[in-house]
Amino acid sequence: MDTLDFTSLDLLPGIALVLDLGGRVVHSNRACAELLGHPSAGLRGQPIAALLADPQDAVCVQAIIEALEAGEPAKTFECGWMRPGGERRIFAISGAIAPGPDAGEALLVLTGVDVTQIVCRREEDIVRLRALLEQAPDGIFIADLNGRFTDVNDAGCQMLGYAKHEIVGKPIIDVILPEDVERMLRSRTQMLGGAVEVGTWLLCKKDGSHLPVEVSTKLLPDGRWQGLVRDITARLQMESAMQDSIIARRAIAARDEVLGIVAHDLRNPLNIVLLHSEILRRRGAEAPKSLVAIRRAALRMSRLIGDMLDVTALEAGSLAVERDEVPVRSLLDEAIDTESDAAARAQLQLRIEAPEQTPALLADRDRLLQVFDNLIGNAIKFTPAGGEVVVGAQHQDQMVQFSVSDTGAGIPPDELAHVFDRFWQAKKTDSRGAGLGLPIVKGIVEAHGGMIWVQSEPGCGTTFYFTVPTKL
């Protein structure tokens, strides 16, 4: 390597300082006098640390010396230099080892360019950026790859209720739910692959409450995480309010539908009552058929009103069930007796298929008769003359399984799933009921701790099954 030529250093536009390996100035070029404000004679013999604005920069110079002596390339670094008047200038410095004029002597050559204006503009940009971050309405969190926060803006602090110094250094896992830790690690892996992650999270606030947020995370060029965090409490409340509004509108529509059905179905029996009342008024006491018609119409009205009250109780979860010991055979006999006249008028055979000895139930007798009344009544209604309706019962473990079968037209497969829906009717044009019976039946059976289901095949009839617990 050629011996260092001090004269050539004077031709450089930037500063050039030659130091011995002890860190003292051996030579400085002309640019040093202009840029640093020190003549060459005044710099010679000075320790480099005396010229630097920050003692840490002297450590960087020593690191350059050690790296070059070890044969490693020296990195460029920025350091501040003090002019005689106290003005601070910033230079981008690099170094190299060169042989001196004396044999065996090694010197350190530092060269640099003035980057004061560039650094000032950069610092101004950083200040402006910081101001923008602090003014941002969303929280901005920065974390290192170890998952610890290194920075956060004011909005982020306010979201979680922490002061800035309480968040910086805190692990991310301290502000998320334990069950979300694995999800966070998956997000980290995806970000390392260049993905931008967006998702909703529940963050843990300082006071122990939880905050629903939407988080957009990405990897910064320096390897840290950046998370943009938006409080979505108001949005969720709005969505909930909209859902409540939809439910309310549906409830109003259902109410209006019920009122329409009630108005229609009560009007007919009322007209019958009015008509036959007028007949009685005109004929006096000699009108037994009119009395029967009035009673039948009144019973229909009473049953419809009872169904409406039961539906309301089911929806409120307050359907009354008064349990007592109920013998199965006497229950079936009473159910058959109640519907025998209707079956005779429809020219149907109505019979029981059940053993004489079956364990007694622990149930509400009147409610179970209501179930049979509905199921047998439907079977009679939809079975043509000459057909058969069979009521069965068999003991299974701690339950009795009842069945009501008919030889009617059956229910199409696409309608089976809806038979227990409110207002469902086998035929949309059928006006013989409000479509409330089967939902009430289902509610009564389930209130007893049982189950109900249906099997049907078009042209082969329908069978409803339900279970009721026995008395232990």
Image (cartoon, rainbow, N blue to C red):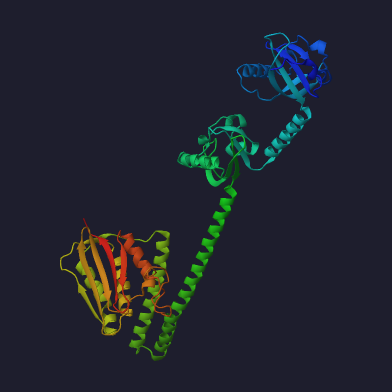
Tell me where residue 154 sits by quadrant.
top right
Q: Which residue is drawn at 60% across and 42% down?
A: 229
87, above or below 142, in the image: above
Q: On the rendered structure, is 472 left or right of 428?
A: left
Q: From this view, report whether residue 153 is shown above or below residue 104.
A: below
* Residue 457 in picture, x, y percent from top left: 31, 75
Q: In this view, does 131 lie to the left or right of 426?
A: right
- Please state if 173 lies on the left or on the right of 66 as rendered: left
Near-viewer residue (126 or 139): 126
Q: Quick one: 335 or 287, which is closer to the camera? A: 335
Percent position of residue 352, x then y:
21, 74
Can residue 327 be seen from the camera position used here? no
Nearest the viewer among 144 and 389 is 144
x%, y% of residue 204? Answer: 52, 38
Nearer to me, 248 or 406: 406
Instruction: Tell me the quarter of the image containing the N terminus.
Output: top right
Q: In which quarter of the image is the C terminus?
A: bottom left
Identify the residue shown where x is 24% and y is 75%.
390
Left or right of 192, for residue 154? right
Residue 184: x and y, percent?
A: 50, 40
277 vs 138: above or below: below
Residue 257 can be seen, yes or no: yes
